[in-house]
Image (cartoon, grey):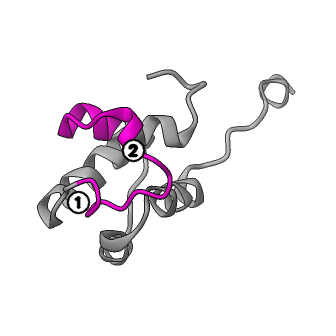
Amino acid sequence: MTLTETPFERVRSVLAKKYSLATDAITPESTLESLGLDSLDLIELLFDVEDEFGIRIPQDGGAALKTATIQDIIDSIQKLVPETPPAVAAND
């Protein structure tokens, strides 16, 4: 995975690899249930997403994701991923 991939592309890649899903079946509107994933899969996915993005999803946030769409998961990730300062600012 590259850093130029969008959060959606990164989540889609995790889902496709881990659960052998066709990437074209995974859309922002897909729910985990519509993709054939159960509660145990959700827990495993949360761990995989935490590893992929270097974040920690609060325990109470995981329960809400059970019926979430892929876009809801991405929105949650984006709230937790620290902002990366521009490279120019790092040289100041």
Q: Magenta segment: does it hold 16? A: yes
Indicate whether 9 appears above or below 46.
Answer: above
- On the image, numbered disc 1 is attached to which residue? 42
Q: Are marks 1 and 2 in contact (CB under 8 Å)?
A: no
Q: What amino acid is labelled 2 in the image?
A: Ile
Q: How many labels does the image show?
A: 2
Residue drawn at (19%, 52%) of the image = 44
Q: In which quarter of the image is the C terminus?
A: top right
Q: What amino acid is labelled 1 in the image?
A: Leu
Q: For mark 2, does the 10 Å Cα neighbourhood hold few (<14), some (14 to 19), or many (20 or more) residues?
A: many
Q: Where is residue 5 in the image (x, y as percent from the top left)?
A: 56, 28
> Which circle's residue, 1 or 2, is located before the other in the chain?
2
For label 1, the SS is: helix
- On the image, numbered disc 2 is attached to which residue? 26
Residue 80 relative to residue 35: left or right: right
Looking at the rendering, the stretch of residues picked out in magenta corresponds to 13-35
Q: Position of residue 1 (x, y in %)?
A: 43, 23
For label 2, the SS is: loop
Residue at the left extreme, as displayed: 40
Q: How far apart are marks 1 and 2 (CA)?
A: 15 Å
Indicate whether 64 appears above or below 7.
Answer: below
Q: Where is residue 70 in the image (x, y as percent from the top left)?
A: 44, 56
Nearer mark to the viewer, of 1 and 2: 2
Residue 89 relative to residue 43: left or right: right
Q: Position of residue 23 (x, y in %)?
A: 37, 34
Residue drawn at (48%, 58%) of the image = 29
Residue 56: mark = none
